[in-house]
């Protein structure tokens, strides 16, 4: 019997070695300058988690970041020399996900709009590396360490869509319980809440919280994603008990989009959602 969800991610695109080498070089130069990942991230416009992922080779270095790093870290042109190879590698990048996920991942990577409703855990595009590892480490049946590492790397690689230019418009509606569930423990939970606040400050991202006290919820059918690819109609994606479904029927997508619109109207506005998240973070 063929398994619906292979555990082995799709074969890597061949750029891993280049990204890993560039990440190591950037880390060495940063440490020689006595800069923390937070310090350097503030200089180039990225958070410490993103810098960490770049240095480990699990997140693609943008050419402009490499050029900035060359100047800021006084690399003397060493990093700039690799920019043409990096640009070439980026044109060859394929999604590095399980085969069952690749059709959705390809659409997500080129989408002009992305909308997510989550009722169990933080969506992948918002997860910290530690949160993602905790999620994969606890899933059943158990995954081996190599597969967990690959899944975490693939999940972090997806987050590049938030940094892409032109930027897609991205929104999230998170059930309040998602903020309260201590996946991975208290420290991981605190880092994840801080990550939500950082990403929520991006100009193209809005995060809203659906209070648990809401009495008449318009959607009891589970989590879903809505995305609009370039030059194509909006589609929806759901995954229940390991069975993924990419929905393209226009009427069915419209129904899900209508529900999402109602939920956005009922959820706390973005600024009030930030206030709630800050309060929960302070209480941990």
Image (cartoon, rainbow, N blue to C red):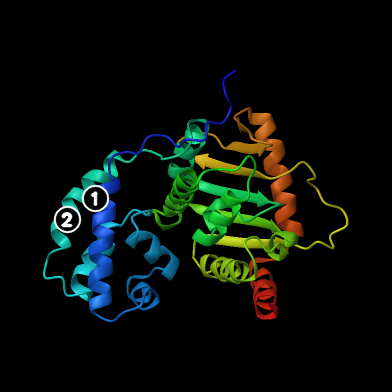
* CB atoms of marks 2 and 1 within 8 Å: yes
Query: Which residue is drawn at the image coordinates 24% and 50% (left, top)?
Result: 18
Q: Quadrant of residue 63?
A: bottom left
Q: Is residue 221 visible?
A: yes
Residue 126 percent across, percent down from the top left: 55, 58
Q: Tell which of 274 and 33 is nearer to you.
A: 33
Quarter occupied by the C terminus: bottom right
Residue 120's disc is none
Q: Tell which of 61 and 251 is nearer to you.
A: 61
Q: Does residue 212 appear left or right of residue 163 in this picture? A: right
Quarter occupied by the N terminus: top right
Callout 1 secondary element: helix
Q: Tell which of 151 and 174 is nearer to you.
A: 151
Query: Which residue is drawn at the image coordinates 88% and 57% (left, top)?
Result: 215
Gap between marks 2 and 1 measured at Cα? 9 Å
Q: Which residue is mark 2?
A: 82
Residue 205 percent across, percent down from the top left: 53, 60
Q: Is residue 47 visible?
A: no
Callout 2 secondary element: helix
Residue 112 percent across, percent down from the top left: 47, 46
Q: Does residue 241 appear left or right of residue 33 in this picture? A: right
Q: Does residue 148 appear left or right of residue 215 in this picture? A: left
Residue 18's disc is 1
Query: Which residue is drawn at the image coordinates 70% and 79% (left, top)?
Result: 283
Q: Does residue 162 appear left or right of residue 16 in this picture? A: right
């Amino acid at each position: 019997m063929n398994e619906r969800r292979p555990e082995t991610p799709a074969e890597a695109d061949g750029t891993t070695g280049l990204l890993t080498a560039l990440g190591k070089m950037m880390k060495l130069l940063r440490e020689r300058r006595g800069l923390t990942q937070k310090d350097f991230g503030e200089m180039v416009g990225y958070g410490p988690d993103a810098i960490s992922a770049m240095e480990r080779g699990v997140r693609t270095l943008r050419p402009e970041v490499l050029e900035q790093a060359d100047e800021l870290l006084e690399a003397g042109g060493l990093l700039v020399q690799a920019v043409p190879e990096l640009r070439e590698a980026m044109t060859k990048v394929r999604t590095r996900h399980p085969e069952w996920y690749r059709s959705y991942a390809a659409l997500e990577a080129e989408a002009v709009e992305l909308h997510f409703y989550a009722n169990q855990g933080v969506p992948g595009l918002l997860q910290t590396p530690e949160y993602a590892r905790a999620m994969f480490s606890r899933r059943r049946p158990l995954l081996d360490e190599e597969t967990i590492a690959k899944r975490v790397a693939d999940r972090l690689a997806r987050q590049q869509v938030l940094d892409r230019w032109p930027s897609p418009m991205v929104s999230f509606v998170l059930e309040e319980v998602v903020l309260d569930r201590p996946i991975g423990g208290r420290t991981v939970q605190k880092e994840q809440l801080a990550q939500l606040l950082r990403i929520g400050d991006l100009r193209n991202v809005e995060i809203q919280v659906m209070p648990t006290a809401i009495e008449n919820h318009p959607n009891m059918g589970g989590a879903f994603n809505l995305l609009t690819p370039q030059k194509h109609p909006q589609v929806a994606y759901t995954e229940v008990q390991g069975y993924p479904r990419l929905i393209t029927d226009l009427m069915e997508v419209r129904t899900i989009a209508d529900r999402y619109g109602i939920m956005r109207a009922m959820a706390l506005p973005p600024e009030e959602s930030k206030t709630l998240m800050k309060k929960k973070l302070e209480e941990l």
